[in-house]
Image: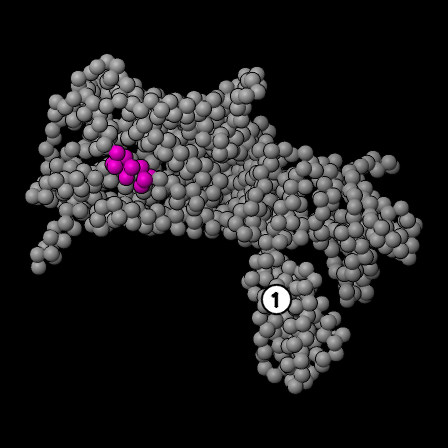
Amino acid sequence: MRNNSWLVGLYIFICFIGMLIALPSVLPQSLVDKFPSFMPKNRIALGLDLRGGSHLVLEVDEEDLVGGLRQMYLGELRSFLRKEGVGVVSVHQIQDKIVVSLSNPLTRAVVVGKIKDFLQSASSQGSPRQKNSFSIMENGEKDISIVFSQKNISEVIALFIEQSMEIVRQRIDQIGISESTIQYLGSNRILVQLPGEQNPLRLRQLLGTTAKMSFHRVVDRQKGMIPLGASLLRDDEGNEYIVNDQVEIPGQNLIGAVANFDEKTHQPTVDISFDKIGSDRFFDITRHNIGRMLAVVLDGKVLTAPVINQAISTGRAQISGYFTIEKAGILAAILRSGAFPVKLNIIEERSVGASLGSDSIYKGIRASVVGFTLVVLFMVFLYGKWGLLANFALLLNLILTVACLTVLDATLTLPGIAGIVLGIGLSVDANILINERIREESRKNKSAFYSLDMGFSRAYSTIIDSNMTVLIATIVLFFCGIGPVRGFAVTMGLSIVISMFTAISIVRAMMIFIVGYKKMRQIDIKPLFQFLTIPDRTAIQFMKARFLGIGISILLSVGSIVLLCTHGLNYGIDFEGGVQIGVSTHKPVDLSIVRSNLEALKIGEFSVQSFDDEKSFLVRLKYQPSDNHAQEHILELVKKKIIDIIPFATIRSTDIVGPKISGDLIKKGIIGVIIAAVAMLIYIWIRFEWNFAIGAIATLILDITKTLGLFSLCGIEFNLTAVAAILTLIGYSVNDKVVIYDCMRKKMLFQESLPFRELIDKSINETLARSIYTSMTTFLSILPMAVWGGQVVSSFAIPMAFGIFIAASSSIFIAAPILLFLGDWRYRYARD
């Protein structure tokens, strides 16, 4: 048995390239800058939770869009039918329909034909409307209704989202923000991430404004009433203006906007300039309206309404108001980039301060180093010098994972670090399986090379099956999760795939080399400390305790369900929506003082609680069912009050999550858990048999209910990270059961005469060492994250640590007994 030289060369080449790619991510930037030109210099991109920054999700206001399109069609169709003179009394709107009323029912066919001509003509002129995108219905004798089809709406949204993406990019570029991420999020949303941006208010002003600017004449009240064809608008100070609805100059005629200072008042202003059409129109308006006011309106709010003193022919104007320098700059940037073609609502806003990001990095690295060290020590204690090979594979796994993340241009988040740490624990599973299989062969006095060959061969299918279950859960998590949770799925998925390569290929090659170089006749895998090993031959009759095991499990699960029904879950902002503010101070603060001061603001239901330590706290406010601006107003109000009562406080993070986002996340979480469970059922059914699949799924349900009971009992926040824990636990739980199932399957093939109950007991005993060792390494890897990872990942790490032992015990005392019951039933059914 020898190594294939070209394969070994390939392994060395892959590892060397991986180390070169990973190196810049672990060295200081000053050293990386000195690298020669042929060496890679790209580093892993850090997520907002690690480096600080702002995150926004913008969504098309579909109701506003459809209403605007309907009004546009209404006016154009009314003009078209009047011009055609086909006997139409009126064209008006009723709810979501455009209704055409006829003067003579006999003209119905003619009018329907004209309406179709109008719609077809509109489509041929390049408008975002399609032929057959409307439903034309005949209501009664004299009414014809036109209804938008969803196809038409979706087409317009797609067009406007594409235009809005470019405008978002232009606005961000205008104010000099670098390294921005702007991408589609579904069919009607835009995700904007700005690393390092610490001013969410500026970002909100920049992107939360549609920027539909227009110029209107200000008219006088008529006997205290608002005249027909006019509207009442206000400015930022609450001053009221009655403006003519007719647009004198639309914003499309603007060609320039620059922040400046007024020479007389020395106040910030915005200087604007018009194109040729706008300049001519502006000259006409100012010439004929001297002594009257002209209102500059932005998104339905009056910016300024100066009195016209003279005709202006230069095509330039100055917008003044209650501007700060920053606000004038933002307004100029908005006007230069143009208006969004459709109203965009901010449905999610998150901001992380730089200090919180650096703290997260420190906590993540500390937890990772401690977890890695614990696993390394455990493997050495367990397998001695052969454990060093497994540890070398672990180090390679870590290096190659970092290299893959760099090549894929993936973003590393704090949950992503948790994924790497958990991946380390899970990746040891393959090495434990291999070592235990080799140890079994060695006990039979087999030669070293034979033990190696049989050990890897027998472990191969088990490694593939057990890792596939975790990979399935990871893939589901990637597609059903968002943001940092997807980062967790990527890192853990990569770690698992790479671990199969390092364990099956790299470790195998190293073991063959060592055995051949030392001319070993047998492989003696011994622990450093004998008490760590499970006895060679255990004969525990686990099935005797099957009724007790299932009874206790059902009792705990019922208790968990009762807890969930009575106490419920402590839902985080991801699922409840609302406003959340993270605050830190340099000394402990009396939170009762904070609560009493916030109560005076009359901001509705809120909570104040400690976060991580006594020098940090969270303020959470329920979602206010009015509009998005209400959440933004409350956020700024609370931030100001906190700084007023605690001058030395630092706002470390802010979050605003609307009901649409929270509703979507709940839906994705439920769908993800269901898909993962069904995928496990199908995979096990295919790889084993239906009774194995049912046993695993029934056990999964009991495992999940107990884990949810832990959330309820301990008040652990249930958020997106918690869903990641549930999905990972599904994969891990099935992973543990697959190892026992694989042993059962082999015994069923070669020991057909063995009673099923005895077969199950023997399979559990033979895989007992692997189950305990794997559970210990996974637990040791995740334990530091649960202790030192901070509250951000506590909703993942604590339930995961709990779930590891639940999964290990349920494999023996729940899944196996269920399989025995199903096997007995199947035998009786076949006999009858």
Q: Amino acid at mark 1?
A: Lys
Q: Which residue is mark 1?
A: 131
Quadrant where the image shows the C terminus: bottom left
Question: x%, y% of residue 42?
Answer: 53, 26
- Residue visible at 33% across and 32% down in the picture: 500
For the point 25% across and 37% down, the residue is: 461
Q: Main secondary structure of the magenta part?
A: helix
| Residue 106 visible to the viewer | yes
State whether residue 436 is above or below residue 314: above
- Residue 65 appears left or right of 17: right
Magenta residues (range): 460-470
Q: Position of residue 72 (x, y in %)?
A: 69, 64
Residue 35: image location, x then y, percent: 55, 18
Q: Nearer the viewer, residue 366 or 475?
A: 475
Q: Quadrant of residue 226?
A: bottom right
Residue sitting at x 78%, y 39%: 258
Secondary element at tag 1: loop
In the current view of this chain or complex, which residue is farthest to the top? 518
Q: Position of residue 282 (x, y in %)?
A: 86, 52
